[in-house]
């Protein structure tokens, strides 16, 4: 399945784009998405362990199956105050 992933904050800066396209098998999970991002965009590798992935309005874990019908977004942890 071909996915359009929205990138935010530092992830967008490193990817060099607001959205990226990733092609994954139909039964892919978030862990597969992380691996594909690292393979296609090596500049993202340092960020991948802490990168948050959201599908629709919910955060996803590495075990979560990818639902191509939902919007998928990636962003680093945020801090501030």
Image (tube, grey):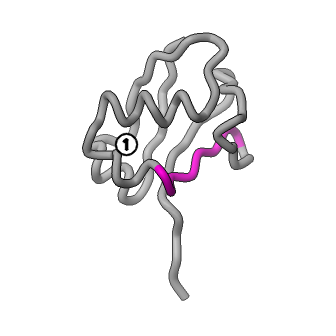
Name the residue nearer the viewer: 12 or 61: 61
Height in image: 62 above or below 11?
above
Residue at x 72%, y 46% (from the top left corner) = 57
Q: How many marks?
A: 1
Which element carries disc 1, helix, strand or loop? loop
Residue at x 51%, y 16% (from the top left corner) = 24
Q: Is residue 9 left or right of residue 33?
A: left
Magenta stretch containing residue 31, yes or no? no
Q: Position of residue 72 (x, y in %)?
A: 58, 36
Determine crowd level at label 1: few under 14, some 14-19, many 20+ residues with C-alpha closer than 10 A. Answer: some
Residue at x 56%, y 12% (from the top left corner) = 25
Q: Position of residue 3 (x, y in %)?
A: 51, 22
Q: Is residue 69 left or right of residue 13?
A: right
Residue at x 54%, y 28% (from the top left corner) = 32
Quadrant position of the C terminus in the picture: bottom right
Q: Residue furthest bottom?
A: 81
Q: Position of residue 55 (x, y in %)?
A: 67, 38
Q: Quadrant of residue 71?
A: top right
Please report the bounds of the magenta region as a residue range.
Answer: 49-56
Q: Position of residue 70 (x, y in %)?
A: 67, 30
Quadrant position of the N terminus in the picture: top right
The residue wearing badge 1 is: 18
Name the residue nearer the viewer: 41 or 35: 35
Height in image: 73 above or below 3?
below
Name the residue nearer the viewer: 23 or 36: 36
Q: Is residue 15 left or right of residue 50?
A: left
Name the residue nearer the viewer: 55 or 34: 34
């Amino acid at each position: 399945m071909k996915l359009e992933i929205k990138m935010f904050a530092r992830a967008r800066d490193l990817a060099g784009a607001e959205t990226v396209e990733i092609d994954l098998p139909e039964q892919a999970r978030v862990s597969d998405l992380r691996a594909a991002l690292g393979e296609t965009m090596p500049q993202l590798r340092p960020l991948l362990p802490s990168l948050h992935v959201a599908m629709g309005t919910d955060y996803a874990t590495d075990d979560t199956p990818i639902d191509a019908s939902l919007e998928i977004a990636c962003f680093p942890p945020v801090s501030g105050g």
